[in-house]
Amino acid sequence: MISQQEASSVLRDVEATQTRTVRSGLYAAASPHLLLWGAVWACGYALCQFTGAEQWPIVWGVLTATGVAAAFLLSWRQGRGHDRRDRSVGAIAIMTLTVGLFIIASLVLFAPVDPRAALAFPSLVMGLVYIMMGYSAMPRLAVVGAGIAAVVMAGFLLTPEWTALFAAAAGGGGLMLGGLWLREA
């Protein structure tokens, strides 16, 4: 017969193992998406650094449409063989669309005078989203989000003329490194 203390210890161990297993699955699902969006961000922000602001909507329109299509393909491939009642892929798509529309609406409403502010803002919002997601279930994602936000703000404040390249490195590079880091978790 085991003692109450031993039983409690075993239950805590089982719960910790279950938490690690769920977190590992979340990291495995998120990793390819971070790699994908990291590549989109790196290309988009690098192109913005070397093109005029009038070209930015075209750059981001093409890259965003490509990224969304690729993300849906990734989600579809990841969802094969999973329980059909699992609506997490759809929920993530709706959340992504909501955040994207929030960014667009904010830029329209507040129309930054400095176009570099318009470049930095989406990275800051996404950094915040990753931090919030990290707090709930994936601590590594919170680290990725904080790093993105910190580096983009540093670039904007310290070397404003290079904001887009800071965003390419922090947003794009940070997401890709984060995706590799999540893969190892």
Image (spheres, rainbow, N blue to C red):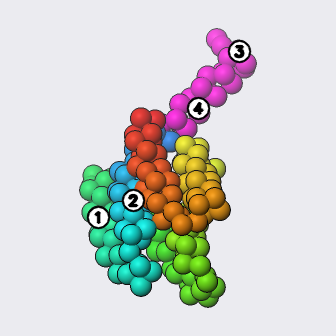
Q: How far apart are labels 2 and 4 at the CA level?
A: 37 Å
Numbered disc 3: secondary structure:
loop
Q: Nearer the viewer, mark 2 or mark 3?
A: 2
Q: Nearer the viewer, mark 4 or mark 3?
A: 4
Q: Which residue is mark 1?
A: 70
Between circles 1 and 2, the one closer to the viewer is 2
User: For mark 2, what is the residue?
Assistant: 42
Who comes first in sequence, dot 1 or dot 4? 4
Whether label 1 touches label 3, CB < 8 Å: no
Q: Residue at x 47, y 69 (%)?
A: 96
Q: Is residue 68 left or right of residue 165?
A: left
Judge whether residue 18 is colored magenta: yes
Total numbered labels placed on residues in the image:
4
Vertical arrangement, residue 5 with respect to residue 147, above or below: above
Counting other residues with Cα less than 10 Å from the Cα at mark 4, is it few (<14), some (14-19), or many (20 or more)? few
Looking at marks 1 and 3 on the same chain, the residue that comes earlier in the sequence is marked by: 3
Please name the residue shown 56% across and 29% down the image: 14
Q: Position of residue 100 (x, y in %)?
A: 49, 74
Main secondary structure found in the magenta portion: helix
At x 59%, y 33%, the residue is 15
User: Residue 85, percent across and down?
Assistant: 39, 61
| Amino acid type, label 4 | Ala
What is the distance, in whole Å, between disc 2 and disc 3 at their CAs? Answer: 56 Å
Which label's residue is closer to the chain start, 2 or 3? 3
Q: Earlier in the sequence, mark 2 or mark 4?
A: 4
User: Circles 1 and 2: CB distance less than 8 Å?
Assistant: no
Above or below residue 154? Residue 21 is above
- To which residue does mark 3 refer? 3
Amino acid bearing label 2:
Ala
Disc number placed over residue 16 in the picture, else none: 4
Residue 26 shows in the view? no
